[in-house]
Image (cartoon, rainbow, N blue to C red):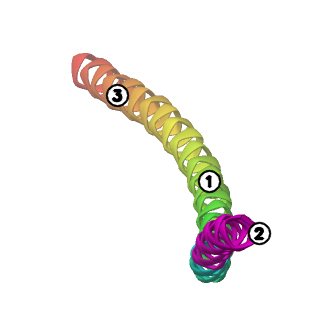
Amino acid sequence: MPKCICSTKVRELETEVEAEQRRGADAVKGVRKYERRVKELTYQTEEDKKNVNRLQDLVDKLQMKVKAYKRQAEEAEEAANQHMSKFRKVQHELEEAEERADIAETQVNKLRAKTRDSGKVQNCC
């Protein structure tokens, strides 16, 4: 009977060893799977960092362009204000010149009328 017990015990131990070997192999597979996942995530993280850096560079460039456009818009607005001021000044000067021309024309017409009237008076006498 001891031989039977021993062979049974040996089979049980062999079964346990096989089960432990399977669990060990499964654990190794699991570790390798997680190592691959860590590598994938590390690579993805590096790619994400590169993308973030590229996007930040684009943001910086766009912000510089926006500042340049704002400056150009301010300069254009300032130039437009200066031109409008000059236009108003010239328009005012034109209105004054037209007014003076009207006054001068009225005076010329009065003088012509006076000259005609004085000529008629001299012819009559």
Identified at 32% across, 31% down, the residue is: 112
**Most foreground residue, 122 or 49:** 49
Q: Position of residue 103 (x, y in %)?
A: 49, 30
Q: Position of residue 33 (x, y in %)?
A: 57, 74
**Amino acid of disc 1:** Glu
Provide the residue designation for mark 2: 2
Q: Determine whether, in the image, residue 116 is placed left or right of residue 83.
A: left
Q: Residue at x 51, y 35 (%)?
A: 95
Residue that sits furthest to the front in the current view? 1
Task: Name the side, left or right, on which 31 lies relative to 113.
Answer: right
Q: What's the CA distance linking mark 3 and mark 1?
A: 47 Å
Give the residue type at disc 2. Answer: Pro
User: Which quadrant would residue 63 be assigned to in this image?
Assistant: bottom right
Foreground residue, 81 or 26?
26
Q: Residue at x 62, y 69 (%)?
A: 11
Q: Is residue 16 magenta?
A: yes
Earlier residue among tags 3 and 1? 1
> Would you name the residue on which mark 3 appears?
109
Where's residue 2, x and y in %?
Answer: 77, 69
Q: Tag 1 or tag 2, which sits nearer the N-term? A: 2
Q: Which residues are magenta?
A: 1-30
Counting from the top left corner in percent of width and height, residue 10 is at 68, 74
Disc 3 from disc 2: Cα separation: 154 Å
- The label number, if any, that marks residue 31 in the structure image: none
Rendered image quadrant of residue 16: bottom right
For the residues labelled 2 and 1, say whether their Cβ atoms are less than 8 Å apart: no
Q: Which mark is residue 77?
A: 1
Tag nearer the camera, 2 or 1: 2
Helix, strand or loop under label 1: helix
Mark 3: give few (<14), some (14-19) or many (20+) Cα within 10 Å. few
